[in-house]
Image (cartoon, rainbow, N blue to C red):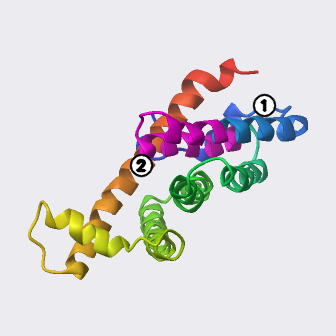
């Protein structure tokens, strides 16, 4: 196991030498797979977060099997195409938060400096949290802080929207690091159990 992060410097061990010519084909397959997984969140009684986590793991798998450029193509194409097939809220979550995280994770963890990696991930989470709050209001018409106040006040007596927002941010941070760890487990499972069996 690779712990809470991956040793991306070991990728050359998992990559073959015949990747270049198959990048476009691989990208097309992974884009289609991503769309299918995302679409399943709207028709099957499954956790949206679980589906988004699995869908977002496609991008780092693409990095492993191909390269970062192909992974960026898969993420961008999946984000553009999926807007026509999946609900707006799921599309927004994938495009803004989950879809590109595998690329961010790759570049951060290649630094191999644990404290710096934790700091950069924390900064990334805060930027995404602020963008999510702004875009949820602008695109979906959802006041995230007001919604957080209503939800949290059912369980805890809180003193206003600001405190509710801070609690919501804290819960989101915990979920974010759990998601990061889950992503590591999924990619590790792929690298150890699946990659070398797929030609």
Q: Is residue 38 left or right of residue 83?
A: left
Which corner quadrant holds the C terminus?
A: top right
N-terminal-most mark, 1 or 2: 1
Task: Identify the residue at image location x=22%, y=68%.
Answer: 150
Q: Looking at the image, which is closer to me, 110 or 102?
A: 102
Q: Is residue 20 left or right of residue 118?
A: right
The numbered mark at residue 16 is: 1
**Mark 1 to mark 2 CA distance (whole Å):** 29 Å
Task: Identify the residue at image location x=44%, y=50%.
Answer: 180
Q: Is residue 21 above or below residue 90?
A: above
Binning the other alpha carbons within 10 Å of mark 1 as few (below 14), some (14 to 19) or many (20 upward) gives some
Q: Is residue 128 above or below residue 39?
A: below
Task: Identify the residue at image location x=78%, y=31%.
Answer: 16
- In terms of secondary structure, what is the magenta stretch mainly? helix
Task: Identify the residue at image location x=56%, y=57%.
Answer: 88
Could you say whether the residue bearing mark 2 is in a helix, strand or loop? helix
Which corner quadrant holds the N terminus?
A: top left
The numbered mark at residue 174 is: none
Q: Is residue 31 left or right of residue 192?
A: right
Q: Which residues are magenta?
A: 35-64
The answer to whether residue 90 is visible is yes
Q: Is residue 62 magenta?
A: yes
Could you say whether the residue bearing mark 1 is in a helix, strand or loop? loop
Instruction: Residue 193 in the image: state x and y as whole percent.
Output: 56, 22
Instruction: Residue 134 in the image: state x and y as whole percent.
Output: 48, 77
Q: Looking at the image, which is closer to me, 164 or 53?
A: 164
Q: Residue furthest right?
A: 21
The answer to whether residue 57 is visible is no
Instruction: Residue 129 in the image: state x and y as whole percent.
Output: 43, 70
The numbered mark at residue 179 is: 2
């Amino acid at each position: 196991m690779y712990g809470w992060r991956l040793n991306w410097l070991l990728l050359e061990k998992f990559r073959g030498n015949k990747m270049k010519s198959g990048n476009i084909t691989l990208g097309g397959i992974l884009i289609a797979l991503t769309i299918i997984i995302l679409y399943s969140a709207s028709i099957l009684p499954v956790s949206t977060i679980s589906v988004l986590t699995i869908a977002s793991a496609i991008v780092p798998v693409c990095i492993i099997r191909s390269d970062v450029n192909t992974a960026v193509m898969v993420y961008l194409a999946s984000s553009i195409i999926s807007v026509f097939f999946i609900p707006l809220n799921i599309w927004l979550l994938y495009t803004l938060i989950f879809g590109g995280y595998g690329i961010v994770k790759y570049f951060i963890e290649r630094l191999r400096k644990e404290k710096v990696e934790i700091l950069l991930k924390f900064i990334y989470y805060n930027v995404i949290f602020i963008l999510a709050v702004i875009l949820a209001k602008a695109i979906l018409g959802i006041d995230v802080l007001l919604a957080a106040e209503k939800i949290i006040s059912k369980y805890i007596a809180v003193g206003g929207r600001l405190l509710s927002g801070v609690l919501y941010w804290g819960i989101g941070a915990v979920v974010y690091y759990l998601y990061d760890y889950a992503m590591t487990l999924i990619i590790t499972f792929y690298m150890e159990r699946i990659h070398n069996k797929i030609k």
